[in-house]
Image: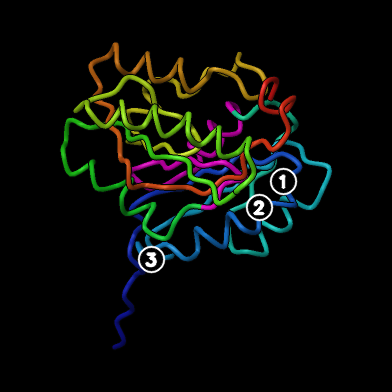
Amino acid sequence: MTFHHAPPAPLASVVVPAFDAAATIRDCLAALGAQTLGRDRLEVIVVDDGSSDATAAIAAAAGATALRQPHSSPAVARNTGARAATAPVLLFTDADCAPDPTWAERMLAPFADPNVCGVKGVYRTDQRAVLPRFVQAELEEKYRRLARFESIDFVDTYAAAYRRDVFLASGGFDALFPAHSAEDVDLSFRLARQGCRLVFAPDARVRHRHADRLPAYLYG
């Protein structure tokens, strides 16, 4: 008789909402595939929010679970991915982000405390132009302030983690928020009001290309 060992269950499900992201999704998925946690411990789910380009095909070719939905919003796409996820922890990042190799491990580490139900990571950029460096300096000042506190009240979706059961019980992101809006603020405040502990993981980094023109920085 031959016994076959089942593959280890994933520790986390990474949900990546994507809309017309063919130009960036390869780098995002390549970075997720290079995580020190191990590819077999991460379930990667890309939710294509009605793209007109090859986003879904690129995601599927990279080995991610590629889900498609009519164009709606990042909030709806993230909720779709969360419902399809199978791991006990949800990780969220964006299709134009490339997580550092240790990102998943460092996002998961705070969950060793059973009272923690949400974790926030950080943006970094390798750009040298003036405006991206200014944007990063703004972020760094915010991160320095956050690092002083044992708990925080806001988790950004570019590098976010939640216990899946807590996320689903809360209703997830409010689908009424259109485009890139304040759905992460709303969810964070709702969870904090429920007594959930949210924490900051300053070494859990994702690389991002910040706005390099002033109108894009001011108006998104």
Range of magenta residues? 75-98
Mark 1 highlights which residue?
21
Q: Position of residue 174 (x, y in %)?
A: 53, 17
Q: Amino acid at mark 2?
A: Ile
Callout 2: helix, strand or loop? helix
The tag earlier along the polypeptide, 3 or 2, is 2
**Residue lying at 66% horizontally and 27% vertically, measured from the top left:** 217
Decide whether residue 78 is among the magenta residues: yes
Q: Amino acid at mark 1?
A: Ala
- Label 2, residues with CA under 10 Å away: few <14, some 14-19, many ≥20: many
Is 121 located above or below residue 146 in the figure?
Answer: below
Decide whether residue 214 is among the magenta residues: no
Q: Position of residue 69 (x, y in %)?
A: 70, 36
Q: Amino acid at mark 3?
A: Gly
- Label 1, residues with CA under 10 Å away: few <14, some 14-19, many ≥20: many
| 125 or 181: nearer the viewer | 125
The tag earlier along the polypeptide, 3 or 1, is 1
State if disc 2 and disc 1 touch (CB < 8 Å).
Answer: yes
Looking at the image, the residue that sits furthest to the front is 130
Mark 3 highlights which residue?
38
| 200 or 168: nearer the viewer | 200
Q: What numbered label is drawn on residue 25?
A: 2
**Residue lying at 52% horizontally and 19% vertically, measured from the top left:** 183
**Mark pair 3, 1: CA separation:** 25 Å
Q: How many numbered dots are placed on residues in this image?
A: 3
